Image (cartoon, grey):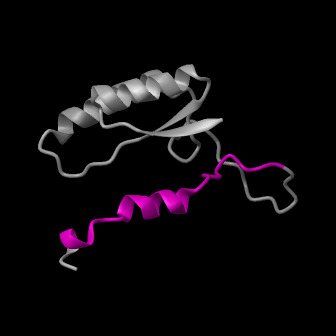
Amino acid sequence: MEAVCSLSGGMDSSTLAGVTKSKGYGISALHRNYGQRIEGTELVCAKKIASLLVAGASCLTDSRMIVDAFNPERQHIPNRYVPCRKEAFAAAGIRDPTECGV
């Protein structure tokens, strides 16, 4: 099974991601820039932690991997499939209405 772990780059999220991996889950790391003044440092740390925890890569982000061609007769899920992609984008876009002046 795969777990999506939100990595800020700090100790809490890094520890939780490590515990999750130790329980046998694959890790998909997610980092979000929310405007914190130390974002540069957080991003560097999150990338380092992700590189230690994430085993695989995606053909959608790694140019060394071949993207499966479209085949309507395919019997398996293509390697370009991203589960819940639209939901992840929607969740990332949710904001406190007061921040938007609503």
> Which residue is painted at 88% across and 59% down in the image?
73
Tell whether position 88 is magenta: yes
Residue 66 figure quarter: top right
Q: Where is residue 2 in the image (x, y as percent from the top left)?
A: 60, 37
Q: Give the range drawn in magenta.
A: 76-99
Q: Nearer the viewer, residue 17 or 71?
A: 17
* Left or right, 29 with reference to 39: right
Q: In which quarter of the image is the N terminus?
A: top right
Residue 63, horizontal then vertical, whole percent: 53, 41
Q: Residue extending furthest bottom?
A: 102
Asked if the stretch drawn in magenta spans residue 16, the answer is: no
Q: Indicate the quadrant containing the C terminus: top left, top right, bottom left or bottom right.
A: bottom left
Q: Which residue is drawn at 43% across and 60% down?
A: 91
The relative height of residue 33 versus residue 19 in the rendered view (above or below) is below
Instruction: In the displayed orientation, state which residue is furthest to the left.
Output: 37
Q: In the picture shown, does residue 88 fall above or below 13?
A: below
